[in-house]
Image: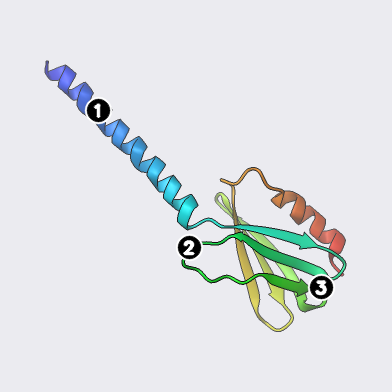
């Protein structure tokens, strides 16, 4: 009987852990993730927020190529950072998480060279 109690306790702990992880993933996607649409043309880049992070006031951006000094990308674990350095000294930083699999982030990075100056 003691062995059965231990197995039930282990099962409960596994279920609690699985539920906690699931809730954390859901909350992260709901409150920390956003979606943007990026368009490039001969004039520059337009960034439109499709789904904003709750309680954050992010603005859409239209950046002309002449305003952009350089780009930088880096990878930290499963997160990519993409930074646009502007001629006026400011920078705009975006993060891309590998949890998002159904987008064209890599294609965007590859296409960037075709549009630059």
Q: Residue at x 17, y 18 (%)?
A: 4
> What is the x, y in percent for residue 11?
27, 26
Label 3, label 2: how many angstroms apart (C-alpha)?
30 Å
Taking depth in this image into account, of 18 and 117 the one nearest to the observer is: 18
State whether residue 108 is above or below residue 54. Answer: above
> What is the x, y in percent for residue 114?
86, 59
The extreme top residue here reads 1
Mark before the other along the chain sequence, 3 or 2: 2
Query: Is disc 2 surrounded by few (<14), some (14 to 19) or many (20+) residues within 10 Å?
Result: few
Query: Is disc 3 surrounded by few (<14), some (14 to 19) or many (20+) residues within 10 Å?
Result: some
Q: Is residue 39 left or right of residue 19?
A: right
Taking depth in this image into account, of 23 and 117 the one nearest to the observer is: 23
The secondary element bearing badge 3 is classed as: helix
> What is the x, y in percent for residue 56?
50, 68
Q: Residue at x 76, y 50 (%)?
A: 107
The secondary element bearing badge 1 is classed as: helix
- Tag shown at residue 67: none
Mark before the other along the chain sequence, 3 or 1: 1
Query: Is disc 1 surrounded by few (<14), some (14 to 19) or many (20+) residues within 10 Å?
Result: few
Q: Which residue is mark 1?
A: 10
Q: Which residue is mark 3?
A: 65
Q: Which residue is mark 2?
A: 54
Mark before the other along the chain sequence, 1 or 2: 1
Corner quadrant of residue 96:
bottom right
Taking depth in this image into account, of 106 and 25 the one nearest to the observer is: 25
Q: Quadrant of the N terminus?
A: top left
The extreme left residue here reads 1
Q: Residue at x 72, y 48 (%)?
A: 104
In contact (CB < 8 Å): disc 3 and disc 2: no
């Amino acid at each position: 009987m003691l062995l059965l109690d231990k197995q039930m306790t282990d099962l409960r702990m596994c279920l609690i852990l699985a539920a906690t992880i699931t809730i954390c993933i859901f909350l992260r996607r709901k409150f920390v993730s956003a979606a943007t649409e990026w368009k490039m043309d001969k004039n520059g880049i337009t960034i439109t927020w499709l789904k904003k992070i709750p309680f954050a006031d992010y603005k859409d951006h239209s950046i002309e190529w002449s305003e952009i000094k350089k780009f930088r990308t880096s990878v930290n674990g499963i997160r990519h950072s993409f930074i646009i350095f502007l001629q006026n000294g400011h920078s705009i930083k975006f993060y891309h998480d590998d949890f998002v699999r159904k987008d064209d982030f890599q294609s965007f990075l590859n296409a960037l060279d075709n549009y630059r100056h």
